[in-house]
Amino acid sequence: MKCSRVRDKLMDYISADLSPAEAQRIGDHLTDCAECRSELELVRRASSALNLLGGEEPAPALVGAVRDKLAREKALTRPILVPRLAMGFSAAAIIALIVTGWLRYGSVDRKQVTAVKPADSIETPADKHVAPKPTMPPQRQVAKEDQTVRIATGVEGTRQTSVKAVIRKAAQRPVKVTPTRKRVVRPEAAPEVPETRVIEPETDSERVMFIAVRPKEPEIFVTHVDSGGERAPTQLTVVREFDEGGNITSVTIEGTALEDDAEDIAPAPDRTHLLDAPLEVDRAAYSPHAGGSTGNA
Amino acid sequence: MQTFNATMMMSESGQPAVMETAVEDEGTILVRRFLAGEERAFDELVMRYQTYVYNVCLQMLANPSDAEDTAQNVFVAVYKSLPRFRMQSKVSTWIYRIAVNQCISWRRGRREELPIEMEISDPSPDFEDAEKRREISYLLQKLAPHYRAVLVLKYYRELSYEEIAEILAWSPDKVKCYLHRARNIFKKLYEAEFGGKQ
């Protein structure tokens, strides 16, 4: 056995974390090798130092402080959308919505992600004074085999948001999503409207920016996603409800934890710049006359 | 403390044998009481785990004030997540997972900051040990968060590979691999810091 390999294993050897056979081989080597024996002394001291971690410091009484924090958070929480709906939606409900959308918009490949087209029916104050532009077909992107999809707006000149969509098993459980802050966007700078977005939380309770549109009132929401300490990739979905005339009646953001097979969750990219960046959008896309294949029958 | 169901059975040799089946540890009972509407059970849960959580945070962050703040956040997260806790792992494992994740997130936010010196607000009577612990905790801060986490869970909590794997949501093999690397990195740091002394 080479000295380098023995030295690499010495910490495990001292910690009795090797198989008997391997420990035997290292023991035999140490008998014959003075240099490795001297290394063993250092390893022994380092290992003893680590064992000092077993000592405990007395913990401060945390109950009162935790209760205070909970009370403060409770006082600050002001759900803006429909958190009960977001909290309560089960996987079955989401699937039902997908099926409903499928039926409504015709046969769409499941791997296609419907391009996000601003709602046809949204009428902004600016629209009253601006003639509608010709209809633009919405973009569609087909998911690649690696299931990375691009979610884009059908609005010319807007940013595109690319996310790694995790189309794995059906959603496992609902995640609490509470909008904690909103910013009303000027109608002339209405934002793009991603339908679905997958985040990979770095913290147990993550703030994410999400953009949603309510009738006549485009808004950016900073949502609070509470992944319950498990940090599963979480799919945020905009669920829009329409009336019989095809007008949006409500918008809800749902959060759903997805099955995570990966051992490591990649750090979530910093998206805060999106919140501060100027939002520019083609107003006409928000006009009642903008059409497209996702339009309402 | 664990409660057990003891069932008297006859072994093959005809001697009575006691089959012990672990039913629920105290943490699980507290969680069930809380979910049944007994708010006070959460306070008991905090009191039960605060020392462990605080010390894990202290080893991970090497600063009593940060450790206390993070430990509070851990229990706030626990409180909010309890209604969705599925009882598929031990309560302690679940709480440690939240604690480790909170510490790692906290450190990420302050990657550049390394404590000049770890403070111990209430040193142990054995001052020499306390001093050594302070030095070791300082060294730990030089490790990447996940390496630090496996060392803390292994040496402070003396958990098995399987338990650490459950907390970090890794495979036991990955834990073993990380522990091996973490020990060797620590050894190098220790050698660089203390050399031949001690």
Image: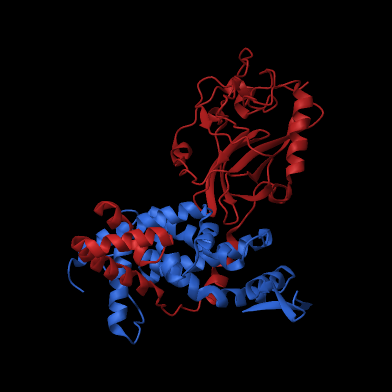
Closer to the camera in the image, B100 or A61? B100
Above or below, comparing residue A174 to residue B2 in the picture = above
Outermost residue on the right side: it is: A244
Instruction: Answer yes or no: is residue B159 visible.
Output: yes
**Chain coloured blue in the rendered structure:** B
Instruction: Answer yes or no: is residue B113 visible.
Output: no
Give how far across and how far down residue A29 sits, in percent: 27, 60
Q: Quadrant of residue B188?
A: bottom left
Give how far across and how far down residue B140 sits, in percent: 33, 63
Give how far across and how far down residue A76 sits, in percent: 58, 59
Q: Quadrant of residue A108?
A: top right
Outermost residue on the front side: it is: B13
Above or below, comparing residue A115 to residue A166 in the picture = above
Rendered hue of chain A is red
Closer to the camera in the image, A111 or A106? A111
Closer to the camera in the image, B42 or A282? B42
Above or below, comparing residue A156 to residue B23 in the picture = above
B84 vs A157, left or right, is right
Residue at image location 78% in from the left, 77% down from the top: B9
Residue at image location 41% in from the left, 54% down from the top: B178
Above or below, comparing residue A260 to residue A297 in the picture = below
Count the marks.
0
